Image (cartoon, rainbow, N blue to C red):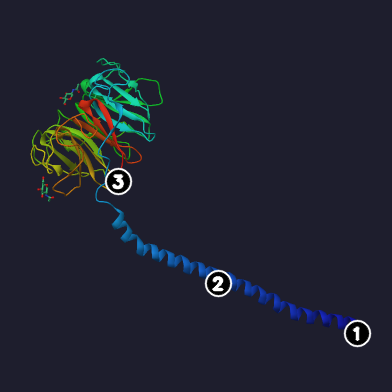
Amino acid sequence: MGLLWIIIGIIIVILMITIPVVISKKETADITKLSTVTTKTTKMTTHELTTTVANPTTQVQSKPKYKKWKQHGITIAGGNGGGDQLNQLFFPSAISIDDKKAIVIVDYHNHRIVEWKYKSNNGEVIVGVNEEGNSLNRLVNPIDVVLDKEKNAIIICDTGNKRVVRLFRQSQTNPQILISNISCNGVAIDKDGSVYVSDWMRLDVRRWKEGDTDGTLIAGGNGQGSHLNQFNYPGSVFVDEDYSVYISDQQNHRIMKWKKDAQEGIIVAGGNGRGDHLNQLVQPYAVIIDNLDQMIIADCGNHRVMSWREGDINGSIVIGVNGYGDESNRLNSPKDVSFDVDGNLYVADTFNSRIQKYELCPE
Ligand SMILES: *[C@@H]1O[C@H](CO)[C@@H](O)[C@H](O)[C@H]1NC(C)=O
Ligand SMILES: *[C@@H]1O[C@H](CO)[C@@H](O)[C@H](O)[C@H]1NC(C)=O
């Protein structure tokens, strides 16, 4: 009996010694963990603080006012004289480039749409048969094209047939008529997939959502003229992220911007009469906006491409030198401009029957 009590006593003593040791070890471990976390947090905060402080300066310094492209272009489609062979184009009037750098080209005078795959020496005919016609696989003097990347479709202004048609790129079927009885002169798509079309007869721009039978008036529709709510031959159209619509108002030699739900437009480029000063344009055919919010304009009648920022009096010449020509730094009546995914600039050099590529200059 006495022995049992001694054993119990020893066990109690052992427990009394070990328990506090275990607990204190655990506490030490927790403290170590905590202190690591604290160090990490301090580090992160310091890091975040440094970046927050550093960012505004770097952004201001590294964001160039204008992007620059090489002055000499490379011919990447056509350039073999005006003609109807597969390595030729005849007055290409518009281009659109997909994410694989395939170029969809409106081959105006050949009444066809051709696609030149990246680095290809030939085009493939997608729609049209080199002859005019109004059956669904024929086009008459197509003017403009836009890619619907979401639906993988090509939307075409089949101007001579007074209709807008759509072709799904994967299918082997004929194009379908999207809009009829329209004097289509330019086509664009917004981020929701709505289609915008300029009509040179009605002097307006309207928008169609999928399934709409009638278009909604977006700009113009107030007759021919040079007031802010009018056009004089509306051409190509571009829609930005905020649903503002940019329209090349060709015979007013200006670019108009109509904000969403606006009753009149704003002159954002040109509008100072016909001429070749830096504040003027001559029959601008196309306008696009790059990711630095600068407009790139095909200043067709001046055989040059200009960049312009809203609010600036002057634009600056991006491509082209005085007068037209077919050298690599000259253009002849450029009618469209486009970018590829890397920001290289492409120009439909219409009267030279070629598509030129200008590489983006490294900053
Ligand atoms: C076609 O549109 C014009 C207006 O541009 C209109 O006067 C005419 O009635 C329309 N024709 C048809 C068949 O809808
Ligand atoms: C605009 O360009 C002209 C030359 O065409 C120049 O004389 C003028 O100073 C420029 N104006 C501005 C505000 O840059």
Indicate if the residue with disc 3 has its beta carbon within 8 Å of ligand 2. no
Circle 3 residue: 291
Q: Quadrant of residue 175?
A: top left
Mark 2 vs 1, N-terminal side: 1
Indicate if the residue with disc 1 has its beta carbon within 8 Å of ligand 2. no
What separation in Å lies between label 2 and label 1 (alpha carbons)? 50 Å
At numbered mark 1, what does the secondary structure look like: helix, strand or loop? helix
Which amino acid type is marked by label 3? Asn
Asked if 326 appears above or below 66 in the picture, the reply is above
Which amino acid type is marked by label 1? Gly
Q: Crowdedness of circle 1 by 10 Å Cα count: few (<14), some, many (20+)?
A: few
Circle 2 residue: 35
Which amino acid type is marked by label 2? Ser
At numbered mark 3, what does the secondary structure look like: helix, strand or loop? loop
Whether residue 171 is visible, yes or no, is: yes
What separation in Å lies between label 3 and label 1 (alpha carbons)? 92 Å
- 297 with respect to 23 (left or right): left
The image position of residue 160, as x and y in percent, is 21, 21
The image position of residue 142, as x and y in percent, is 24, 24
Mark 3 vs 1, N-terminal side: 1
Mark 2 vs 3, N-terminal side: 2
Circle 1 residue: 2
Disc number lying in front (3 or 1): 3
Residue reaching furthest to the front = 327
Q: Crowdedness of circle 3 by 10 Å Cα count: few (<14), some, many (20+)?
A: few
Asked if 41 appears above or below 316 in the picture, the reply is below
The image position of residue 243, as x and y in percent, is 26, 43
Most foreground residue, 283 or 181 = 283
